[in-house]
Image: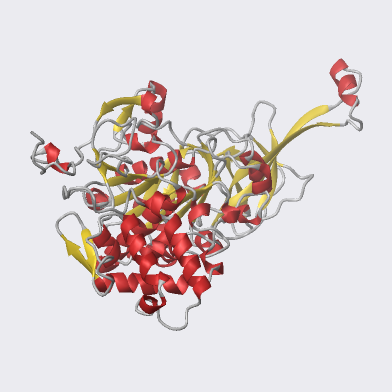
Amino acid sequence: MTEPVGLVVGTEAASPLRFSVGIAPAQFLQLDDVVVTERALPDGTMVRVAGVVTNVEAGHEGARFASDVFLIEQGVLPAEVSEVAEVTVTRVEPEVYVPPRPGTPVHRASGEQRDGALYFDTMGEAKVPIGLGRDGQPVFLNFEFVDGTRGGHVSISGVSGIATKTSFATFLLHSIFNCGVLDREAHNTKALIFSVKGEDLLFLDYTNSRLRAGQRERYAKLGLPAAPFANVAVFAPPRPGDPSGTPDVRARDRAVSPFYWTLAEFCEQELMPFVFADGEDERSQYTMLIGQVAARLRRDAKRVGDDGAITVSGVEARNGGPLHTFAQLVGLIEDELGEDDTRRDWVAGSTSTGSVNAFLRRLRSAVRPLSTIIRADLRDRGDRSLTTARAQVTVVDLHNLPDRAQRFVVGVSLRQEFRRKESQGTARPLMFIVLDELNKYAPREGDSPIKQILLDVAERGRSLGVILIGAQQTASEVERRIVANCSIRVAGRLDPAEASRPEYGYLPPMQRQRATLAKPGTMFVAQPDIPVPLAIEFPFPAWATRPAETGEWTGVDTGPAMPADPFATIPGADDPPPF
């Protein structure tokens, strides 16, 4: 055992769950250090008490006034400097809850003692390295509280741009995929990542040119490769006004596939509710119309050709089609619902004109934001479906889409993957969903189709193998049931006002204060089987996080297949030349 760092003090009462340590003159203790002491029982049993330092105070013993410090420094007034560390108990072995006795030596825990104090010895093969502690040693996450065995889902909170929420989320995925916890399932485990802020997440399969030797050593210490993700597929919406459907990205110059939904898919899959996917819908009177119109389109819309165009039966001949754009489809619905004679074929019961008009206004306002991703005016290339089947990690770039289109894509994609896992009939292999701005998609107030899907994921997902890794600036604005179902809670740099909210009750007062000062890369991780949240620092990403960092491309997905005739994707290419 190492040299004692101090003794249990007697001037402050020790309890079975908390005690104080007088630090020896040649020693020091810092926040988050792990310490251990022992207590002998009358029958000879030795009780080992381990804990984490949660506060350290220094002061003069013998001074009465603040100004005494000057006299003490001059040697006029005798006094001694004392340092006292507060320790929160994390583990007692055997479970005989007695306080440590004053004067008992306290040691800094290392090796097996540290593993025991932090319950790493009970995790077995479920240990996932998530960073290094303040002592420079690895800190682990119990994967059984992530994969659905004993719990599921991860909530990450922090200030935008400083808390490094998405960087930690991707590092956590990297660790899960590479630490061996998935064993033979690693290859088939999937991750779906929504990129909502810029193109920073589009370079996961590029090496990071700024990764230095010191950071590589930190990866080695964690037992992880300092390498980017090897199997990544990137999807982006078509560039507006581009007749060939080129993906709308700027910085990534390879292996990007376009995605959109055809009008036929929009009708067949009843995607109309996601056009109205915002938190205000529950206060509106037209929500009943949405399902009725979607059902009518599913029943009467018929595919025409290979590009996903449709005709609609049972409507005025001038409206029936073929329809190639979302604007044309909206125009048909406006004409049909605008007339009393035709409206009854679309909506049942006595629907007020005000509700119909409100529905049509909202539908018309969706034409501009959604026309890029709901269309049938591009030649079918057979590779524009948003799917997670092609790669281990699928990144969907949304940052160029308007807010309403982002909501549509997130809602439809989540429903598609959730239904796929339901039909699969088994929880393994797992599907991870990484979604930033969770407070936008599942706000505490209001209701929407996306929020209902996210609630379903939070409440039933762990049994189906769908694991949510949600990030948000303010956990206090996220639906309570979603946050409550997250077994792992992580906080980076927090706004002082946000840190005082009850959603961060898992952080002790000192850690709440520290969270307002945390540097990028520092996170506080709370997990059910460790009584105290652990402060960790995770390594600098080994993959590029912005265009300036891109090094070598290591991916395997080459993007969409090139058509035999590139000009065949341009409308009008079959027309005879004008000469």
Spot the residue most to the bottom: 349
Picture quadrant where residue 234 is located: top left
Residue depicted at x 65% and y 57%: 98
Q: Is residue 216 above or below residue 143?
A: above
Residue depicted at x 26% and y 65%: 318
Left or right for 490, reference 422: right
- Give the percent coordinates (x, y) of residue 231: 24, 41
In this view of the protein, which residue sits in the foreground, 18 or 188?
Answer: 188
Spot the residue most to the top: 74
Residue depicted at x 31% and y 56%: 430
Quarter occupied by the C terminus: top left
In this view of the protein, which residue sits in the foreground, 395 or 80?
Answer: 395
Q: Is residue 161 above or below residue 126?
A: above
- Give the percent coordinates (x, y) of residue 38: 60, 48
Left or right for 540, reference 72: left
In this view of the protein, which residue sits in the foreground, 340 or 137?
Answer: 340
In this view of the protein, which residue sits in the foreground, 540 or 384?
Answer: 384
Rendering colour mode: secondary structure
Could one spot residue 385 in this view of the protein? Answer: yes
Left or right for 434, reference 48: left
Could one spot residue 463 in this view of the protein? Answer: no
Count of numbered tags: 0
Spot the residue most to the front: 579
- Give the percent coordinates (x, y) of residue 497: 68, 46
Q: Is residue 309 above or below residue 253?
A: below
- Give the percent coordinates (x, y) of residue 140: 44, 45
Picture quadrant where residue 344 is located: bottom left
